[in-house]
Image (spheres, helix red, strand yellow):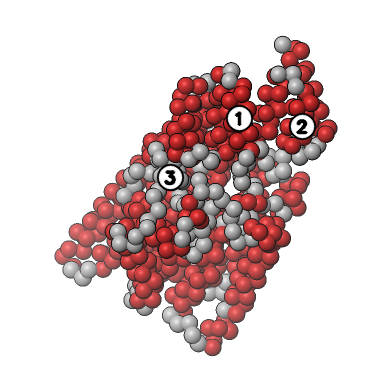
Amino acid sequence: MFWQAKEKWIFLVVCLVMVFSMYGRTLWGDFVFDDRGIVEHQKTLSFGKLPLVLAMPYFTEEAGLYRPTVLLSYALNFSILGAKPWGFHLINLILYALCGWWLRLLIRRLFANDSLACAATLLFLVLPIHTEAVANIVGRTEILALSFSLLALYELAKEKGDSFLIGLYFLLAMGSKETAIAVLPLAVFVVWIKEKKLFEKNIFQQYLWPALALVVSGALYFLLRFFVLGRQYFMFADTTVVENQLKFVPYLERLGTSLAIFWNIYLKKSFWPFDFCSDYSFAQIETVKNFFNYQTLGGLVVVLFLIAGSWFFLKRWPALALGCVFIFFGFLPVANWLLPIGTIAGERLAFFPSVGFCLIAAQLLVSSLAIKIKKRQLFFKAIFLTILLALIGFYGWRSFTRSGDWLTEKKLFTSAAQCAPRSVLSRSNLGASYYLAGDLAGAKKELLTAQEIYDGYPKGINNLGLVYWKEGDIAKAREYFLKALDSRFPFYGAYENLALVSLEEGKIDEARSWLLKFHSGNQETTEAYIQAFLGQNRAK
């Protein structure tokens, strides 16, 4: 017992060493891209405003997201480690290592096979497709959702699990990301694997309270979600064609495209870790109008295999069955198969279902040791260890190199524009990074390229207005600022830019009218803004 307890903590140290070896340099990284939402909400994200944090959407109502667990973790970051990005990256790395540790505990408890548990966990930790979830601070949603899901399933897998803890972990998982709904079907399979049966009266009686805990926790989450997001955004994200063009195409076209994405991005890049990209938005991915292409058909075949495999393998190879369930139900909420979500694709979305990939791969490797050829037993063990170590080394190296793209916005946006040259978002973001660096020519080139791809992205339009303003073309700048506001999803920062242009021209009343819109009618804040601007000009 003493050695088992000691060995458990040693493995945690191994997880931490692996994670910090691959991703340690992210501690010197910045807040990049979506991380900016954390900084913008710093005043709100504090334990002194706990009720407000619990009652707020995940940054905007339009996104249709309610993730209080993650927001609380950001508040904890601000309170303990301050507002510097290194503290947020540090917590991400620790949580990722713990996630792998909890995965091993679950697999070992379910299958009593330490080789399987270690192999699956080590593969999970080194998968390069996880880089977006680990190196990008907002990827914490993925890590927390899976971590609390694993804890809920681990508690359920115990001989006498605590129903309260099962419900609490599930509530925290759902409060991290909606993908955690996969815990419900996974719980059924965990009980089946544990008990070797399911449809018997004593099983229903034994797991009545854990089942009620899961149902009550799920109902509580959705009730809170309804009150926070309202009827309009309770189940749907209000996105533009830029974020997810699949929302605006017929269902069969959406299904065919999402199956092709499943095959070409999630399956392929989980095993062949190259050609990673932080952006797959419009118009980088072309929608599929005909099912008869190898990517859509390949995705469909794999999905059907996962459904069949979850039952076919259950008695003989339960680890393979659980792997199939993890993949299928892990992807189901985010794959655009049922409902369109806020994005067309993202490598971070493979984080939860990747447990299934690793479990299947580990089972196949471990099964090679079971070949009953006594003279060759040592040989097969050597082959197993060689393959496992080679995969860990190769994937670990790819994770390390990929993490460099997330250190600064300039690196991230440059790499995104290279891997997604047809994306209006990537081009616009790269143009913005050039603008901030003072390279107006580079900024203008990228932003005009983005306009050629799609001329309806408000933030990119606003940024082009900034370039014209810097060039001295005030009329053109004003035209683009107004255009950025004339959209279903206006960029409200353009109000401030219009006010600044007016202040520079000495049109105080006009500036006041723009600032009142920017500050939601707050007269006091508006007047303070104007006086600060005038004071700065006098000082000059």
Kind of residue indicated by mark 2: Ser
Which image quadrant is residue 290 in?
bottom left
Q: Residue 156 carries which label?
A: none
Left/right of residue 202 with respect to residue 275 in the rendered view: right
Q: Name the residue under label 3.
A: 283
Quadrant position of the C terminus in the picture: top right
Closest to the observer, 259 or 492: 492
Residue in the picture at 63% in, 27% down: 478
Closest to the observer, 334 or 182: 334
- In primary-sequence order, the first of circles 2 and 3 is 3
| Disc 2, SS | helix
| Disc 1, SS | helix
* x, y percent for residue 424: 47, 39
Closest to the observer, 94 or 519: 519
Badges 2 and 1: C-beta atoms under 8 Å apart? no
Above-or-below relation of 534 to 138:
above
Q: How crowded is mark 3: few (under 14 residues within 10 Å), some or many (20 or more)?
A: many
Q: Which mark's residue is nearer the viewer, 3 or 1?
A: 1
Residue in the picture at 54% in, 86% down: 202
* x, y percent for residue 188: 50, 74
The tally of labels here is: 3
- In primary-sequence order, the first of circles 3 and 1 is 3
Q: Mark 2 points at which residue?
A: 513
Kind of residue indicated by mark 3: Ala
Q: Residue 479 carries which label?
A: 1
The answer for how far apart the CA atoms under marks 2 and 1 are is: 17 Å
